[in-house]
Image (spheres, coloured by chain):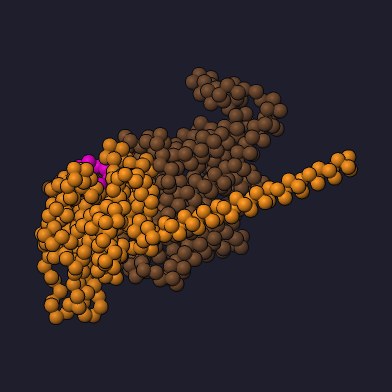
């Protein structure tokens, strides 16, 4: 009995030694591969919040240049007509906000009817420190909280990185509306399901620009393929200092703002 | 103009500061206040029942079956406010058939079913099987068959089988305690995991929900025990009240400490959302937070319960005080659910303004409907107490 246990223990040590060596080898290989991979991929992290799935399709991103927006509201109006959004001022796939920073440091924000009817400056000129318009729309996040929380998976990300909703599948629990930090979702009062910007997916598929971008008189909005290093959008992102909304929430937003001021949320 | 739009125009007129245009309408109304309140009562009542069984708190024996049946009555209704709140209730089953694995909400159906089928129903069945077999033999007509069906044909009442009933019931209770914790901690997680909402997003949320659930469940069982004794014209055992009161006191202290910690953390860190939350708490939620939840639901009950631990005279007065405290704590926990659910939607995610909320009386998500879902479990409980009276149960010794 004693001898047997001794021999088993010797055998066991041998076995442990071999397996330890094997483990160390595998671990080093894995660690090396991870570091190597992340080094190779590191340059892309700046642009892509997540890895696009289908390599053959474009991976859409959006740029909005705050300096170019004149607050005409054409985009919000066009969006409503194009996408069958009720005209009442409670439902918007895109809207424009007017920010007015006053001399006393306070900020006045308005968006009457989403900016569709244009804006009137209500702060007297002498009190204004600066004022600008911020168009808002779905950020088509690559780590979107809205798709994460949908209990049935009715909202999903298209292979092109566009966040969409299956209207025949949505149960109307409204969890996604709660989860979107940007206020981009609403419950369609007629269809009784969640609704939001689709980046005019139906138009994109035909090679047309989203309605809001088509009508913008100053070209303040731009969309494009983030995967294509020679695309206009990638060039723009290279040449400008852009920022996404609420980066600390790590939503992987693909809507990049140029000249975004700190007051904007 | 459609009444829905008219309602929204009214709210728009009452909004303050800047809110995103899609935020005017509150997404979750009074039914979603009722839902965590009801599940909390279930979890709390069950945990009190487990105290008796697992931790052998013999004094709580008279409340054991009452607590289980209370938990079952409320659990049967728990999903109703949720389903009736959906815009597409006819598609509710999709959540069970095609659950989305990353969604906190998708798991609800499974947590719920586990709790209902594996924990509560089984435990009650093992507990009552002996009695149901005896009742089936004693009764005649329809009731004989009702009890026969309820026994599921397991009629063996030999000491060995009854021993197994006990053993299995015990195992289920042991499994049930973490299940109750999961059930309600999970409800807290539904809110606590929404990073877009700073009023909800805190890792403490599931724990706070859990402790407030225990507080509310214990209070409810206390009230149900007193009311049943009143209707049965039986004397209320003060020792039982004192024992429940003691647990209520300790759990309430824990609950109060946790919620206090959460607020202190918010105030001290004073993050981006602090200003708007400060305004929310000091205006929109002032009454429901400081008065209903704080004073009525926590401070006064804590002081009174502490006092009742030492006060030994005037038994009648003591009983009345326990009864009033039970009601006050329930009001407090209901207010807590309100403050979380409604409060979390009153401020804009732009952190620059408020919308307002006016709950309607009629309609699927009106006050009457909410009251109905709160009263229905009481009706179910009355029926269950008639069908399975704990005071007529057959003991092995008999």
Q: Quadrant of residue B375?
A: top left
Q: Is residue A118 left or right of residue A195?
A: left
In-front residue for pair B360/A148: A148
* Percent x, y of residue B117: 51, 34
- Count of numbered marks: 0
* Percent x, y of residue B344: 35, 58
In-front residue for pair A29/A178: A29
Hue used for the chain lettered B: brown
Q: Is residue A218 left or right of residue B162?
A: left
As for residue A199 lying within the magenta part, the answer is no
In-front residue for pair A113/A65: A65
Residue B372 visible, this orientation: no
**Figure quadrant of the C terminus of chain B:** top right
Q: Magenta stretch?
A: A187-195
Q: Is residue A239 left or right of residue B113?
A: left
Q: Residue at x 57, y 32 (%)?
A: B125
In-front residue for pair B354/B222: B354
Q: Residue at x 58, y 45 (%)?
A: B177
Please name the predominant secondary structure of the magenta segment in the image.
loop
Q: Residue furthest top?
A: B141
Q: Quadrant of residue B23?
A: bottom left
Q: Residue at x 43, y 43 (%)?
A: B101
User: Can you say whether A5 is above or below A116 in the image?
Assistant: above
* Percent x, y of residue B367: 31, 48
Residue B255 visible, this orientation: yes
Hue used for the chain lettered A: orange
* Percent x, y of residue A209: 18, 50
């Amino acid at each position: 009995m004693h001898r047997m246990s001794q021999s088993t223990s010797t055998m066991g040590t041998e076995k442990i030694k071999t397996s330890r060596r094997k483990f160390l080898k595998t671990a080093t290989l894995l660690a090396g591969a991870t570091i190597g991979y992340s080094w190779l991929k590191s340059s892309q992290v700046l642009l892509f919040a997540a890895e696009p799935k289908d390599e053959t399709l474009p991976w859409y991103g959006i740029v909005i240049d705050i300096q170019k927006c004149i607050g005409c509201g054409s985009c919000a109006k066009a969006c409503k007509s194009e996408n069958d959004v009720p005209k009442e001022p409670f439902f918007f796939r895109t809207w424009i906000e007017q920010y007015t920073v006053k001399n006393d440091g306070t900020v006045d924000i308005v968006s009457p009817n989403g900016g569709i009817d244009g804006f009137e400056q209500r702060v007297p000129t002498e009190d204004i420190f600066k004022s600008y318009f911020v168009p808002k729309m779905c950020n088509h996040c690559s780590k979107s909280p809205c798709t994460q929380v949908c209990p049935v998976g009715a909202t999903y990300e298209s292979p092109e990185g566009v966040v969409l909703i299956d209207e025949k599948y949505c149960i109307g629990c409204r969890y996604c509306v709660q989860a979107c930090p940007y206020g981009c979702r609403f419950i369609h009062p007629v269809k009784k399901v969640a609704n939001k910007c689709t980046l005019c997916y139906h138009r994109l598929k035909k090679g047309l620009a989203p309605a809001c971008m088509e009508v913008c008189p100053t070209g303040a909005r731009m969309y494009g393929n983030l995967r294509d290093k020679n695309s206009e959008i990638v060039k723009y992102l290279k040449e400008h200092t852009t920022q996404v909304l609420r980066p600390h929430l790590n939503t992987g937003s693909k809507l990049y703002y140029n000249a975004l001021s700190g007051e904007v949320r | 103009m459609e009444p829905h739009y008219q309602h929204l125009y009214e709210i728009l007129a009452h909004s303050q500061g800047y809110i995103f245009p899609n935020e005017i309408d509150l997404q979750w109304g009074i039914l979603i206040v009722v839902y965590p309140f009801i599940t909390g009562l279930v979890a709390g009542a069950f945990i009190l029942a487990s105290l008796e069984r697992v931790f052998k708190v013999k004094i709580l024996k008279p409340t054991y079956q009452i607590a289980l049946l209370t938990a079952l009555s409320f659990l049967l209704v728990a999903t109703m406010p949720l389903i009736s709140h959906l815009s597409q209730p006819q598609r509710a089953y999709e959540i069970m058939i095609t659950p989305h694995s990353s969604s906190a909400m998708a798991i609800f159906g499974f947590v719920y079913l586990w709790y209902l089928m594996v924990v509560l129903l089984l435990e009650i069945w093992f507990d009552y099987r002996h009695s149901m077999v005896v009742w089936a033999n004693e009764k005649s007509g329809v009731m004989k068959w009702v009890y026969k069906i309820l026994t599921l044909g397991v009629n063996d009442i030999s000491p060995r089988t009854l021993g197994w009933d006990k053993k299995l019931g015990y195992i289920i209770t042991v499994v049930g305690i973490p299940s109750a914790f999961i059930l309600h901690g999970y409800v807290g997680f539904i809110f606590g995991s929404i990073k877009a909402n700073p009023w909800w997003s805190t890792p403490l949320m599931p724990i706070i929900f859990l402790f407030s659930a225990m507080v509310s469940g214990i209070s409810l069982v206390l009230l149900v025990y007193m009311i049943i004794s009143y209707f049965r014209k039986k004397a209320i055992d003060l020792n039982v009240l004192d024992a429940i009161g003691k647990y209520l006191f300790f759990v309430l202290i824990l609950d109060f400490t946790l919620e206090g910690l959460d607020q202190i953390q918010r105030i001290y860190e004073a993050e981006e959302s602090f200003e708007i939350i400060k305004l929310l708490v000091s205006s929109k939620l002032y009454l429901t937070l400081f008065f209903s939840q704080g004073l009525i639901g926590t401070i006064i009950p804590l002081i009174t319960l502490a006092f009742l631990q030492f006060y030994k005279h005037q038994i009648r007065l003591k009983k009345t005080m326990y009864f009033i405290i039970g009601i006050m704590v329930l009001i407090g926990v209901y207010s807590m659910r309100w403050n979380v659910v409604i409060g979390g939607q009153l401020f804009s995610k732009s952190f620059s303004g408020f919308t307002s909320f006016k709950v309607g009386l009629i309609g699927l998500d009106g006050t009457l409907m909410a009251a109905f879902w709160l009263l229905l479990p009481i009706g179910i409980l009355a029926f269950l107490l008639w069908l399975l009276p704990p005071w007529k149960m057959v003991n092995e010794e008999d």
